[in-house]
Amino acid sequence: MADFHKSSLMFQFKQFSVEQDQCAMKIGTDGVLLGAWTPIENNPFSILDIGTGTGIIALMLAQRSSASQIDALEIDEDAYEQATDNFENSPWNDRLFCFHAGLDEFVEEPEDDPSNSELAQQYDLIVSNPPFYSEDYKSSNDQRDLARFQDAMPFEDLIEAAALLLSENGIFTVIIPFKEEENFLALATAYELYPLKITRVKGTPTTEIKRSLLAFSRNHTTNFAIDELIIETARHIYTQEYIALTKDFYLKM
């Protein structure tokens, strides 16, 4: 699932555009998949995008939903500034807000203020395309390595935060490497977050499964949907399923 590189470093979607020249992690298939796939049947009032990068997932959810509060979290200063600009230049700038903070700061912030006796803000939908290393190597770009390095946001920290910040009937979604799926499901269960839907993603019909799209809720059910999504049948020949998922966003779909 390679990143999309545009010579202008601006990516144009049907209803919004995204500048990405200041972001280590460019817009890629993973973020677009998560933004398009994430269930919104619970009609979320409030959404949190953890590790927003360019802001692409938050922007897609602003287009798809009627949520009046869409918060995003970004630790990298350059990416935070770019996401803020992308939000302000979008049709939904009154609903989008980016915080410049790490996940631990964001979760602990209400407790640090003795005048704030309220519990932490809760969200009806929490999404994350968490940074991970899919291969065991470092590139020559330190900023990109920080964005990719799993220690920048260990899965357990992400799940613990979601368990704290998710509303009673909320949904938590992620996209992760398929090889991490079993471990992630076990960690989530330990925090009483249970699978609601799983979609495993393959680049082509003959390649191995690369990614897992996972949706969780607080409701324990054994009767959840598991399916598979294939992106292409041949190079740039997209499957009907992938077109149906992304046609509201990509200009050429």
Image: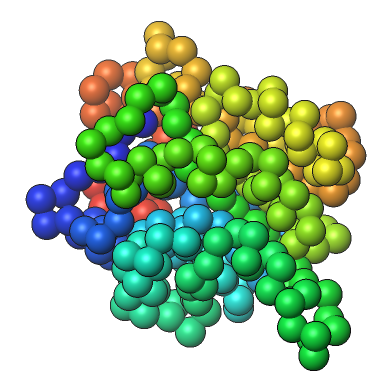
| Residue at 47% in and 61% down | 75
Q: Is residue 144 left or right of residue 56?
A: left
- The percent position of residue 114, horizontal first and vertical second, equals 80, 85
Q: Residue lying furthest left in this view?
A: 7
The residue lying toward the viewer, choosing from 103 and 31, is: 103
Q: Count how many numbered circles sit on residues in the image.
A: 0
| Residue at 56% in and 57% down | 50
Q: Is residue 10 visible?
A: yes
| Up-down relation of residue 227 to residue 24 (above or below) | above
Quarter assignment of residue 90: bottom left
| Residue at 33% in and 19% down | 233
Position of the C terminus by quadrant: top left
Q: Is residue 170 visible?
A: no
Position of the N terminus by quadrant: top left
- The percent position of residue 214, horizontal first and vertical second, equals 64, 37
| Up-down relation of residue 147 to residue 21 (above or below) | above
| Residue at 26% in and 53% down | 251
| Up-down relation of residue 148 to residue 201 (above or below) | below
Q: Residue lying furthest bottom in this view?
A: 115
Q: Is residue 15 left or right of residue 211?
A: left
- The percent position of residue 56, horizontal first and vertical second, equals 40, 58
- The percent position of residue 87, horizontal first and vertical second, equals 39, 74
Report the coloring of the rendering: rainbow
Quarter assignment of residue 86: bottom left
The residue lying toward the viewer, choosing from 243 and 117, is: 117
